[in-house]
Amino acid sequence: MKHYLSLLLIGFLIFSSCRKNTQEETTEKKENYVEENYTKQEVDIVMRDGIKLHTTIYSPKDTSKKYPILMQRTPYSSRPYGEGKMKTKIGPNVHLMKDKYIVVYQDVRGRWMSEGVYDNMRAYNPNKKENEADEVSDTYDTIDWLVKNVDNNNGKVGTWGISYPGHYATVSTIDAHPALKAASPQACIGDFFFDDFHHNGAFLLSYFRAISLFGTYKDTPTDSAWYSFPKMNTQDQYQFFLDKGPLSNLNEYFQYDKLDVKTNENKDRIDDFFWKEIVEHPNYDEVWKSKGIIQHLDKVPSSVATMIVGGWFDAEDLYGPLETYKGIEKHGKDNYNTLVFGPWDHGRWASSGVRNSVGNYYFGDSISLKFQKEVETKFFHHFLKGNGHKNSGLPEAYVYDSGRKEWKSYDSWPPKNIEKKIGFLRENQKLQIVNKNTEFKHKIEPIKFISDIKRPVPYSEDIKTVFTPRKYMTDDQRFAARRPDVLVFETDILTEDFTLAGDIMAKLKVATTGTAADWIVKVIDVHPADAEENNDKLQGHLKMSNYHLMVRSEVMRGRFRNSFEKPEPFTPNKKTDVSIKLQDVFHTFKKGHKLQIQVQSTWFPLIDLNPQTYVDNIYKAKKEDFKTQTHTVFTDSSIAFSVLK
């Protein structure tokens, strides 16, 4: 139970979503729905290479009809295990559960009760020999067994999942089984060098405690957790990582005694294989490239309908769902492929809660419930129980404007009616926005700041430790704006609404006295001084008056500015181009607000601390490599926006 609750904190398990409709509905009645209406069967399905994958099947007790199969493959356990032990909620949401589907959960290869050895983001092998297997073939073999052996199925299968299970939903669409008709990858990992543990080559240090969840070795089925999480023994993660120093000092947390799960005896000393992979492969080499799934989206057949779901404020997997949608669009002109993005953090659309907020910022009520009932349920019903025609009644892109706090429907994403505008980072903290092709001359000024390795810019003003940070995505950025090592550029008060719809590209012109640096760009919605829309979840020291809402942010590890494969140092004091692609947004900066850009070079301990002296491998940097440097941003730096006409 301890480890189960930990997984919930990490956010990789789905939120409980059996909602009370009335105060009179009892807990006993809610918890017994699955038991009263479904039977459970546990089977071990043999894959083409002989490995057995543990699979749990929930089938409606009413056998007078045939039902579609809804399947989730997961590394987070298909528990509860054992006869008579059943989940209290199955399927993507309560509506689909009560609408009756055959719901299947499977432990992926090497996890929990399945045989084999786990590989974190196992590489797809497009040229498998007869008895070779990967996650694509495991999915295919599982579906093939299910449609041939599960009673009362109608021959149609759908897949879904959030986060890592969302990745496996994407995997299911590659070289898909003919029975697969619908897939909904949600918060799906796309490429591990740009999702979760890395962002543009920078290591997400804040995910440090989650490493062992994926890298602790196991080669025997088990119904109990075989991993443990590092203990920090502090409530102040900023100071913890600052005191630890170089990343190499974290190695001690990822060396452990290999345990025989049957005898509970130590076998030998072993390194966490995921941590070792991160340390030994600091660049975007073939190891990381092979693990990416978005490179193979040309293999999604038109027979599989896809609905990609994500949250605008998802700190963990924002890149993945956006790039998955765009990849299928690019290669599958005849595919039914839709996008849903709402005002959520990681997986919050599966919540049964009425209130929808991310951190301090409140977006409204019943947003997740509306998605579950009117979008997700309709998608699966149409393609698995209905006629499955391309005209599903759902829009191509169903997206939430996080500034206006309202849903919009478009027939493409980004919308067709957008134009490019350029924001120049001017002296005196000015952001000057002009049309893309506007030509004018101005004096180019250098703006300098000191990047002190002993006082890095925090990503949050909260004093706490977290497994995976989420709240910071909407945090008030005033604490950062008031530091001398954060450069601020903002517009005058807007006289009309200004809507960003699509990606953002920062084109910085920079220099450093050192040979290495990171660059972080944040897009901020500065609320009016007289804003009074306070809510009861707002932290006590904050007010909405002048609230600096972070709309989008991203980091670029400077060594990768020209190539993720071949890093290179900066030449000291030389003006250099650094471009940063910020992920898509859909946000209206309302009349009376201001649009602000923040530029900084540290973001601690969200990302690891750059030595600011070039070394071949930052994971092996020494204490003496870390040096305070002076950085410069020039006023011909710019930000390219996609703006709704």
Image: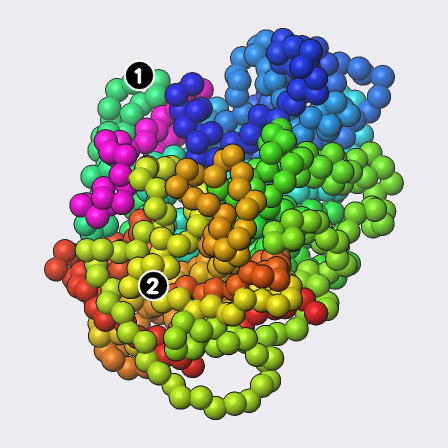
Asked if residue 607 shows in the view, the reply is no
Compared with residue 101, is residue 482 higher up or lower down, i.e. above or below?
below
Q: Going by the image, does 237 lie left or right of 436?
A: left
Give the residue displayed 34% in from the left and 46% down from the top. Answer: 461
- Residue 161 is situated, as x and y percent measured from the top left of the image, at 60, 37
Compared with residue 593, is residue 474 higher up or lower down, i.e. above or below?
above
- Residue 236 is situated, as x and y percent measured from the top left of the image, at 26, 39
Task: Determine which residue is flagged by label 1.
Answer: 263
Compared with residue 235, is residue 132 higher up or lower down, i.e. above or below?
below
| Mark number displayed over residue 472 | none
Amino acid type, callout 2: Val
Question: Mostly what secondary structure, the magenta segment?
Answer: loop
Give the residue displayed 19% in from the left and 64% down from the top. Answer: 628
- Residue 263 is situated, as x and y percent measured from the top left of the image, at 31, 16
Asked if residue 397 shows in the view, the reply is yes
| Magenta stretch in the rendered image | 216-244
For the image, the number of numbered tags is 2
The verdict on residue 58 being magenta is no
- Judged by depth in the image, the label closer to the viewer, 2 or 1, is 2
Q: Quadrant of residue 449?
A: bottom left
Task: Give the quarter of the figure containing the C terminus.
Answer: bottom right
Q: Secondary structure at mark 2?
A: loop
Q: Could you classify mark 1 by the number of other residues whose Cα lies within 10 Å: few (under 14), some (14-19), or many (20 or more)?
A: few
Q: Quadrant of residue 253?
A: top left
Task: Determine which residue is flagged by label 2.
Answer: 486
